[in-house]
Image: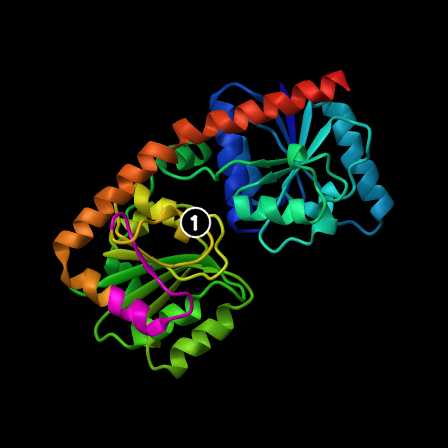
Amino acid sequence: MKILHLASGVGVGVAEQQFERLVGALQTRGIEQHVLLSASGPRGERVRTLGIEPREIDFPGRFKFLDRRTINGEIRRTAPDLVISWLPAMGQLVENGGPTHLGRLGSGLDMSLVSGCDNLLAPSRVRADKALAAGWSAGRVHVVAPLVGPDAVAAARQTAPKAVERKTYFTPSTTKLVLTAAEFGNDSGIEVLIKAIARLSGFYLWIAGDGPARGALEEHAHELGVKPRVRFLGWQDDLRPFLAVADMFVSPGSQDDTGDFVLEAWTAGVPVIAADGLGPGLLIRQRENGVLVPVGDAINMAEAVKWLSRDVDAARRLGAAGASTFSESWSMATVLPQYIALFEQLARRSTTE
């Protein structure tokens, strides 16, 4: 089986993170892969460390017909059994009639951007249902969970995480530290968590993430008078060093349909509080392996943070239960074979049609 990936060379976010992890994980299984990146940069260098020489182009270029020629020329040159488009703008230019074309469904993605794909990869049932509602047949929409955890990170990075000390981010060692992570958008819920922290004396908040709403979130923290206790860390591909020094992880998003950040926290045995949204609400069993609070409710979120900080036994129990849940159902040993089985199925379909 031979796979060609079409991906962003410079963007940061969950899709880009998952692309790197999956490429690294598939590489450990000896699957032949080729990579076409939209730009040169650090991602290309990381892909090279995996033993793959990516082709890096300047996309989008001045003329769409030249972009189309470049992308489809790469498909003909590499002759893959399967093309996976992680960047919809590149996937739109893939010509029909070639190898099976699998497009990844991103959060909030306009379905018209993947209309040219043969099949869709959905990281959650919620996104798959959106595709079905848009007229896609069930046999062409495939749900596979995201790759998370130390094995997935190691496969992509091949290096141990660097230790993080609280003093690096001017955070006292004795204070209670809350960690969160998100792509900053209208539904990240970070503004609700900042409100919750503002209601709590002495708690610090570390926010791993980035996006167009960052400036507004920083201003929000300033207006509430909590900015001195809030640290914006930027996007972090590997949360493990930060989870190692956090007392708890809070996932406040209203539209988080995958719950992958919850899973990341569980891998480290860190207790989780989450808004009862689409993803976390399906993962968490209330006060068994985490704590759920109503979406958008800063008061209840603050109360949950306060309770978990005071009840050490409960925090330890929830963290251990979360780690057990992850190991049982969401580890790379469980999820990676699902990706490989799907890709082999689609590759066989490509050779028989």
**Image side of residue 13 versus residue 151, left or right:** right
Residue drawn at point x = 70 percent, y = 49 percent: 134
What are the residue bounds of the magenta stretch?
A: 288-304
- Please tell me which residue lies in front, 331 or 204: 331
- Please tell me which residue lies in front, 175 or 339: 339
Quadrant hosting residue 347 = top right
Expressed as whole percent of the image width and height from the top left, the position of residue 335 reads 45, 31
Question: Label 1's element?
Answer: loop
Q: Quadrant of the N terminus?
A: top right
- Please tell me which residue lies in front, 111 or 194: 111
Task: Establish if 262 lies above or below 33.
Answer: below
Quadrant hosting residue 206 = bottom left
**Does the magenta-highlighted stretch encompass residue 175?**
no
**Does the magenta-highlighted stretch encompass residue 298?**
yes
Q: Quadrant of the C terminus?
A: top right
| Crowdedness near tag 1: few (<14), some (14–19) or many (≥20) residues, C-alpha within 10 Å | many
**Image side of residue 126 versus residue 196, left or right:** right
- Is any part of residue 39 visible from this angle? no
- Please tell me which residue lies in front, 314 or 136: 136
- Is any part of residue 110 visible from this angle? yes
Task: Establish if 173 lies above or below 271.
Answer: below
Residue drawn at point x = 45 percent, y = 61 percent: 253
**Image side of residue 61 versus residue 156, left or right:** right
Q: Name which residue type carries label 1.
A: Gly
What residue is shown with label 1?
259
Expressed as whole percent of the image width and height from the top left, the position of residue 130 reads 62, 49
**Image side of residue 235 versus residue 288, left or right:** right
